[in-house]
Image (spheres, helix red, strand yellow):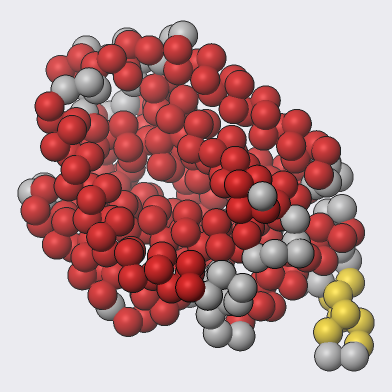
Amino acid sequence: MAYLEAFAAAIAWVVLPGLAAAALLDRGTPAERVTPERFVTFALASGLAIWVVGARVLDRVDGLTRGPAIVVGVLLAVASVGLMIGPGRSTLRALMTRRTAVFAGWAFGSTFLGAAPLLRLLYDERDALINSTPWYYWNLVRQTVAAGGTPSRSYEWGTWVKFLDAYPGFTPGVTVFALAGGTKTLAAAHVVTAIAMLSAGLAIFLLVRALGGSLAGGAFATLLFFAIDVFASKLSSLRPESLGYAFALLVPILALEFVRTGHKRVLVVLAATFVGLGQVHGIDWLF
C-alpha cells in the first residue's frame, strides 16, 4: 500500500501537471510544428519544477503535512486532467502520429533498458538504501515529516545541530511522497530514486536530439550514460544530485529551443527549470 500511495503522489505531483503544462504551452501551435521531442521536454521540465518548487512553497507556508499535501496533489491531478481534455486537447491530438510512436519507442525504450539493472537493484534492495549517505538524506525527510515542515534543529551523533537545509526543494519534494506513503517503509525514497533515474536518462536522450543527433544516437548516449559508473552509483540511491542531473540537462535543451524558435513560452519553462535546479541543489556538484 505504501508504494501505491507514493506512486499515486508522483502521478499527481509530477506526471499529470507536466503533461498538462506541455499540452497548454503548445496550444494553438500548428499541428505540423508540434513535435514529440518538444512536448516531452516541456512535460519533463514542467512536471519536475512544479513538484520541487511546489513542495518548497508548501513548506514555506507551513503546509507540509499529510492533509495539505494530499489535497494539493488531488487538486493538481484534477486540474491537470481538466486542462488536458479541455484547452490542451488540440496539442495531444496533434501528437497522435507515427512519428510520436517511433520517438516514444526509441526514447522510453532506451531509458528503461539502460535503467533496468538499477531498477532491479532497487527492487531487490527495497528494504534498504544503497550506501550510507542516502540514509542521511532519508533521515532529513523523516525529521521533516515528524516536524510538519523543515525543522530548525536536528539531532545528530548525540548532539543537537542546525538542520541541514541545503536542499530546499529536494527534502520537501521527497517529503510530499513520504507524507502519502509513510516513513515506516522506504517507498517514498525508492519512488523518488526511480523518478530521478528515469528523468536523467530521458533528458540525455532529449539533449542529443536537441543537438541534432539521430534517434539511434540518442538511444546510444542514454545507454552509455547508465553504463558510466559514477552516474550509475549516484542514480541508484536517494541523492539530491541524482535529481539535479535531469534539471541540469534540461536547462541547455530549453535554451537551445528558445534560440531556435524565439518563443517566450520556452523562457517561462526555462526559468522554472533553473529555479528547480537551484532548489534541488547548487551547480558545483555535477561531477
* Quadrant in which the C terminus is drawn: bottom left
Q: Position of residue 32 (x, y in %)?
A: 15, 17
* Residue drawn at point x = 27 percent, y = 64 percent: 114
User: Which one is nearer the viewer's eye here, 251 or 6?
Assistant: 6
> In this picture, is 162 found above or below 35?
below
Q: Is residue 174 left or right of residue 248?
A: right
Q: Position of residue 158 (x, y in %)?
A: 90, 90
**Residue 63 x, y percent position in the rendering:** 83, 42
Depth order, front residue of 277/229 = 229
Q: Is residue 185 above or below residue 234?
A: above
Instruction: Confirm whether residue 92 shows in the render.
Output: yes
Q: Nearer the viewer, residue 177 or 240?
A: 177
Residue 160 falls in image quadrant:
bottom right
Write the residue at 17% across / 47% down.
106
250 relative position to 262: left or right: right
Which is more toward the observer, 79 or 7? 7
In the picture shown, does residue 124 fall above or below 62? below
